[in-house]
Amino acid sequence: MPNLSGVPGPCGGAWSDCAQSFTIVPPATIKFFEHTNYEGAMFVADADNPRLADSNWENRISSIQVPHGWKATLYSSQDYGGSSINLSADAPDFPSIAGPCGGTWNDCAASFRLRPAPLWQITKTHSGNFVRGTKGSYVIKVTNTGAAATAPDVGVEVVDTIPTGLTISSFQATGWNCRLKGSIKD
């Protein structure tokens, strides 16, 4: 980390006097490879591409590396048409992914879009110790730390396994549909 003591900051002094923390956001680039397992020729992209033919990459991709927190949507036709597949993680073997070109996605992409994806962080905390015969509580906090919101038609499910020896007497969650043992808790 660079020394921030000499860099003017918004607090009337140097950044080192007012910055409590910072986050480094990696560039959103995806890497496309000509062969499986990230081998052969490669190109890097950081924006949508409606016509891979213009760069001589149409129907030539066999593996892809997608950065954490991002999603690549590949299309079998130019201008984001035809069949599509969403990838939010690395995919080293397109021949093993079912698709529209001879039954797989190997050498099948003609265009793509790159989008930030939701990235969920879940923490469970409590204060003090749980004592047998007394009430205790803990908090489960679900936070989207990604660069995008969750799509309205996509549900988020959080499952918590109750620690051995504890019994649930009540629970609540604003804006969530909570279930206990498969039934909705009123």
Image (cartoon, helix red, strand yellow):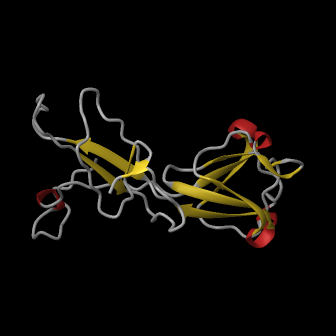
50 or 130, nearer to the observer: 130
85 or 184, nearer to the observer: 184
| Left/right of residue 35 with respect to residue 148 in the rendered view | right
Q: Count the numbered circles shown.
A: 0
Which residue lies at the image location 42% right of the left edge and 49% below the top edge?
Answer: 183
Which residue lies at the image location 27% right of the left edge and 55% below the top edge?
Answer: 172
116 or 118, nearer to the observer: 118
Q: Which quarter of the rendered picture does the C terminus lie within? A: bottom left
| Left/right of residue 169 with respect to residue 122 in the rendered view | left
Pinpoint residue 9: horizontal percent, then vertical percent.
Answer: 18, 67
Which residue lies at the image location 46% right of the left edge and 58% below the top edge?
Answer: 118
Pinpoint residue 97: horizontal percent, then vertical percent.
Answer: 75, 44
| Left/right of residue 75 with respect to residue 25 in the rendered view | right
Pinpoint residue 23: horizontal percent, then vertical percent.
Answer: 32, 54
Q: Is residue 150 above or below residue 171?
A: below
Pinpoint residue 53: horizontal percent, then vertical percent.
Answer: 82, 64
Which residue lies at the image location 14% right of the left edge and 62% below the top edge?
Answer: 14
| Left/right of residue 120 with respect to residue 35 in the rendered view | left
Q: Is residue 60 above or below residue 125?
A: below
